[in-house]
Amino acid sequence: MPFRDAWLAVGILLIFVGFGASESSIGLIGTVIVVLGAVARYWSKHLFDRVTLTRHPSERRAFIGEEIGLDIELSNKKPLPLPWYEWRFALGEALPVEGETLGAAAVPGLKWLHRRGSLGWYQQHRWHFTLRPTERGYHAFGPGTVKSADLLGAFPRTMDDGRRESITVFPRVLPMADLGLPSDRPFGERKGGNRVFEDPLRIAGLREYRPGDPLRRIDWKATARSGDLRSRVYEPSATQQIYLLVNIDTMEHSWEGYLKEELERIVSVAASVAAWAAGARYAVGILANGAFPDADRPIRLPPSRSRDQITRILESLAVIQPLTMGDLAGAIQRESGKLPAGSTLVVIASLMPPALAGVLARLRDEGHHLFVIATSDRVRAQLPAGIAMREVGGAFEREGVFN
């Protein structure tokens, strides 16, 4: 039986035996055991009173390779010291610490940052670490635990701060030139110069139907009255919009797994285009067949020019996992009535399944301006006619961005 469970019984027994046998030394030993046990028990009970383990990361969001400062402080604000301690702090595997070898944790995907020492009364110990994330994602940060014991080490205790947080690491953002796209008009232009975006809610008038006018432009009531096809004329829109449609599938069937490099390429291309569009003052949005953590719906952010829109898009791309929430074709069909009229729909994909090709053909026929960025050579064969496309996979491989 360990001392921490039997000290009181053993001490009292020795006291009675000592006094009963007129052996004062035995009784004294029993008294010492009871006193030391009581002191150790009290010490252990109040060991973590006014003891705090705090952490202060310099950033909660960062890009791959950027430095994140991490300050950790262990403070003891009472007269009872910690004879020894060991604190451990959980970090995601994609958040390595410069100059440190992290210990293995029982939880997959986590490592332990740890330190040992002793802490006197009213004393503080501080440490500064530098994290340098290696992968995009939503990486675990915490909890922190402290182990210690009384002076005899008889009654060890553990304090867990219970704080589980995260650090969001954004995907790589590259200049448009690195994608093989011109930075002035990466998605082309229509005849006659810059494309004029129109606001379908602001009708300027009617005109005769012209070959090539989409069906949704036709005013059927005016056509019925006049007997000739009439098309609506819209006032120009003050805001140009780009809506990113991101297909994160890299294999035809989910049970086949996924291609990590292709997935990272898709995400990085989407982030790069979104960053360029925000910098060019476009209203930019995203629809992807991935999901936010603890959510069961595809990622959807309608086009916006708000200041925090690009941050929201990068965060949504950062948390994308290989597990999809259905196919992109289904997501587009459910959102077809909400697709902003007059916007440029930029499809980013490494696969072009028949269902997605069919949806894009329908959007083309409805008059949407479509542009496909293919991150592999598997898209071209299935791409519907009349839709512009640019492949960027080869450029990435030559530059070794994801190798």
Image (cartoon, rainbow, N blue to C red):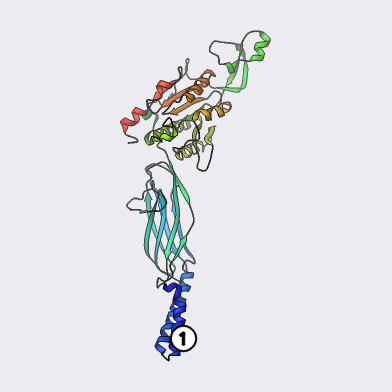
Q: Is residue 236 above or below residue 40?
A: above
Single out the residue that lies furthest toward the bottom: 22
Which residue bears the numbered disc 1?
Answer: 16
Q: Nearer the viewer, residue 347 or 128?
A: 347
The quadrant of the picture occupied by the N terminus is bottom left
Residue 201 coordinates in the image, percent (x, y): 62, 23
Residue 241 coordinates in the image, percent (x, y): 52, 27
Total marks placed: 1
Q: Secondary structure at mark 1?
A: helix
Identified by mark 1, the residue type is Phe
The quadrant of the picture occupied by the C terminus is top left
Residue 177 makes an appearance in the image:
no
User: Is 286 left or right of 87, judged from the image as shown?
Assistant: right
Mark 1, Cα crowd under 10 Å, few <14 / some 14-19 / many 20+, is some
Asked which quadrant contains residue 87, the reply is: bottom left
Q: Kindly identify the residue that appears in the image at 50 percent across and 40 percent down.
A: 292
Residue 380 coordinates in the image, percent (x, y): 40, 22
Residue 312 coordinates in the image, percent (x, y): 50, 38
Q: Nearer the viewer, residue 401 or 122?
A: 401
User: Is 298 left or right of 228, judged from the image as shown?
Assistant: left
Single out the residue that lies furthest toward the right: 225
User: Is 234 left or right of 256, judged from the image as shown?
Assistant: right
Residue 336 makes an appearance in the image:
yes
Single out the residue that lies furthest toward the top: 227
